[in-house]
Amino acid sequence: MTLLNDTEIDAVVIATPVRFHYEMAKASLNAGKHTFIEKPMARTVAEGEELVALAERQGLVLMVGHTFLFSPAVRRMKEIIDSGDIGELQYISARRLNLGLFQKDINVAWDLAPHDISIILHLLDEQPASVSCQGNSHVTRGIEDVTMMYLNFRKNRCAFIQNSWLDPKKVRQMTVVGSRRMIVYDDTEPLEKLKIYDARVEVPPHYDSFAEFTYSYHYGDAYVPYIKQDEPLKLECQHFLDCIREECAPITGGRHGLEVVRILEASTISLGQHGAAVSLDPSAPSRNGDQRLDGDGKSANSNGHGNGNGNGDAITPAAGRNILAV
Ligand SMILES: NC(=O)c1ccc[n+]([C@@H]2O[C@H](COP(=O)([O-])OP(=O)(O)OC[C@H]3O[C@@H](n4cnc5c(N)ncnc54)[C@H](O)[C@@H]3O)[C@@H](O)[C@H]2O)c1
């Protein structure tokens, strides 16, 4: 409170466990401070929406610690994709695994997937139409330590995110598959973080019989693009200060942070529905009817063990935008 009452202080950084983010950020914004919150910005969409609205009302910078959008490798990957070099982006597969650190209040998806989700939203420049997630808890009952999330995007594009606190090796890998080329991003590599493979499958444009139908596999060179070394955390902090000074919106502002939380919240609902697809599209009709749940971010049959193959038949309202299982 002393800090928030100090008129010499213009900005506050909140880097505590997620359960404190909302209350602290709310107090900071109400005290008129520009606020940086570590990822994920809040525990629920409702909390995130309130913080975004509060920052906008107060005319304050609200930034979320989605550090990887400041990684030179991710920035280069975005440039390569936007240039059309890899062709039509078809799917992204991400793996973020390690041994621990076990959290007591959030599952592994809330701990590790925010980075992958934030990168994927940045690369694809759109929100997924639906989210599914399956997972299991092996160590702490009710808190999934392995999860697999599936994000379904328009135009036949999708992304898979695998997260684990139970893996002997630290893995930070993302594969971006395009119709002409493929990119492998390995953040554990000290220098050669990106590798571009000139590999693709070609389908014959016309064929009359099954005998004429053959796929051809193209294997070309692989190359490593030059990436200037820069520390993402330093760039992130500099961006926060620049946004305050220049009164502009951060790349990883409250709205970006909120979209990440929306996907995480949908993943929790899906886990409770045994992996059912949860729609983020307000106009999408439910395939199974519209059975409403409580809207508290938990599904009716959630038991903390989200494994299985249910057929999801419920919708969950979330403030501002419907989330429904399809
Ligand atoms: N952007 C990134 O790359 C990245 C990396 C790691 C962690 N994080 C995020 O940073 C946040 C903190 O993670 P961590 O691993 O450092 O957690 P941690 O538990 O190791 O550290 C949290 C810090 O918050 C302090 N704290 C806890 N409760 C507090 C309270 N009520 N008031 C004031 N201080 C309090 C603790 O004393 C500790 O110094 C999380 O949101 C996490 O997701 C982000």
Image (cartoon, rainbow, N blue to C red):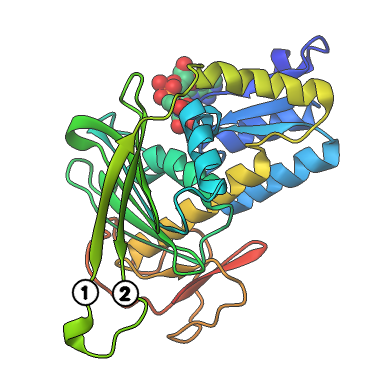
Q: Label 2's element? A: loop
Residue occupying image coordinates x 76% and y 46%: 53
Disc 1: CA contacts within 10 A as few (<14), some (14-19) or many (>=20): few
- Amino acid type, residue under disc 1 in the picture: Thr
Tag 2–tag 1 contact (CB < 8 Å) = yes
Q: Earlier in the sequence, mark 2 or mark 1?
A: 2
Quick check: 230 left or right of 96? right
Q: Is residue 184 visible?
A: yes
Note whether 160 is above or below 155 in the view shown: above
Residue occupying image coordinates x 18% and y 40%: 139
| Residue 115 position by quadrant | top left
| Residue 180 position by quadrant | bottom left
Q: Which residue is mark 1?
A: 214
| Residue 35 position by quadrant | top right
Disc 2: CA contacts within 10 A as few (<14), some (14-19) or many (>=20): few
Q: Quadrant of the C terminus?
A: bottom left
Q: Which residue is mark 2?
A: 204
At which x and y percent is residue 231? Answer: 50, 17
- Furthest residue to the top? 8
- Amino acid type, residue under disc 2 in the picture: Pro
Quick check: 267 left or right of 108? right
Q: Quadrant of the N terminus?
A: top right
At which x and y percent is residue 95? Answer: 30, 42
Residue occupying image coordinates x 26% and y 33%: 171
At which x and y percent is residue 138? Answer: 17, 45
Residue occupying image coordinates x 48% and y 16%: 229
Residue 23 has which mark? none
